[in-house]
Amino acid sequence: MKLSVSVLDLDFGHLEDSIRLLESADIDSLHMDIMDGQFVDNISFGPAIVRTIADITVLPVYSHLMIKEPEKYVKEFFNAGSDSVTVHIETIVKENKHILDTDNIGLSLNPDIELSELDPYLNKVSEILVMSVYAGFGGQNFIESSLGRIEELRKKRDRLGAGYKISVDGGINPGVASRCVKAGADEVITGSYISASKDPVGAVKSIREAVRNLT
Ligand code: DX5
Ligand code: ZN
């Protein structure tokens, strides 16, 4: 299992220290939650902060765009040092679907969006990011029906011989992470469980352990 940590709730006053601490934990990448106040109610940060973080860290940087008209910004987020950029299917229309032909592009969807909406793109994208909370805020509870969606995406991938990674984003803690992996997830993204912990390195360890104890 790959483990990515959302920087949304990190201490931005001591960004470099927070990132160095995460790097000392057993994590695989950093997850940038980009929110525009339109597609979601919250506003977070833009490409300049992604660039700052990408320059600081040795870890891969993944940008999750929760924004309207993503076609205007995808290139900018890659140029800012993102290793991959994920957009929401809810923001894809006929006129901008060409962005899904970009290398290292992922697709995400909120819990109320039918999985079948993804069908035309499953052979193109490198990642399906299953939202297990409604996009917009950290600290929400995991929505249980996400497990069935992960299973379904796993089956579809086998059927199609497609190459997308299945990631899960929202409400991840050790117990939830192990159930997501059991359902077929390749990666979990966790935010508040790590950043609200007094011991982020130990919090990462406890997620790893829960997943290891699966078998
Ligand atoms: C929600 C974001 C998630 C979230 C993760 O809109 O995409 O990445 O902040 O944080 P937790 O783990 O607190 O749900
Ligand atoms: Zn996210």
Image (cartoon, helix red, strand yellow):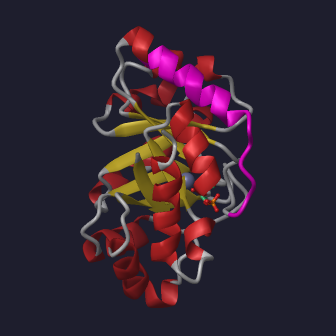
| Residue appearing at x 49%, y 15% in the figure | 156
**Towards the viewer: 91 or 149:** 149
Tell me if residue 140 is in the magenta stretch.
Answer: yes
Residue 50, position in %: x, y? 39, 67
Give the answer, above or below, for where 155 lies relative to 61: above
Residue 133, position in %: x, y? 70, 47
Q: Is residue 6 visible?
A: no
Q: Quarter-wise, where is residue 108 in the image?
A: top right
Q: Check the image and name the residue furthest to the bottom.
A: 13
Residue 42, position in %: x, y? 69, 63
Q: Is residue 128 visible?
A: yes
Quadrant assignment for ligand 1:
bottom right
**Which quadrant would the N terminus be assigned to in this image?**
top left
Residue 30, position in %: x, y? 40, 62
Horizontally, is 1 left or right of 60 in the view? Answer: right
| Residue appearing at x 45%, y 49% in the figure | 212
Q: Quarter-wise, where is residue 56 in the image?
A: bottom left
Horizontally, is 42 left or right of 93 in the view? Answer: right
Give the answer, above or below, for where 68 lies relative to 119: below
Tell me if residue 183 is in the magenta stretch.
Answer: no
The magenta span reads 139-157
Give the main secondary structure of the magenta stretch.
helix
Horizontally, is 137 left or right of 71 in the view? Answer: right
**Towards the viewer: 36 or 129:** 129
Horizontally, is 172 left or right of 41 in the view? Answer: left
| Residue appearing at x 28%, y 36% in the figure | 103
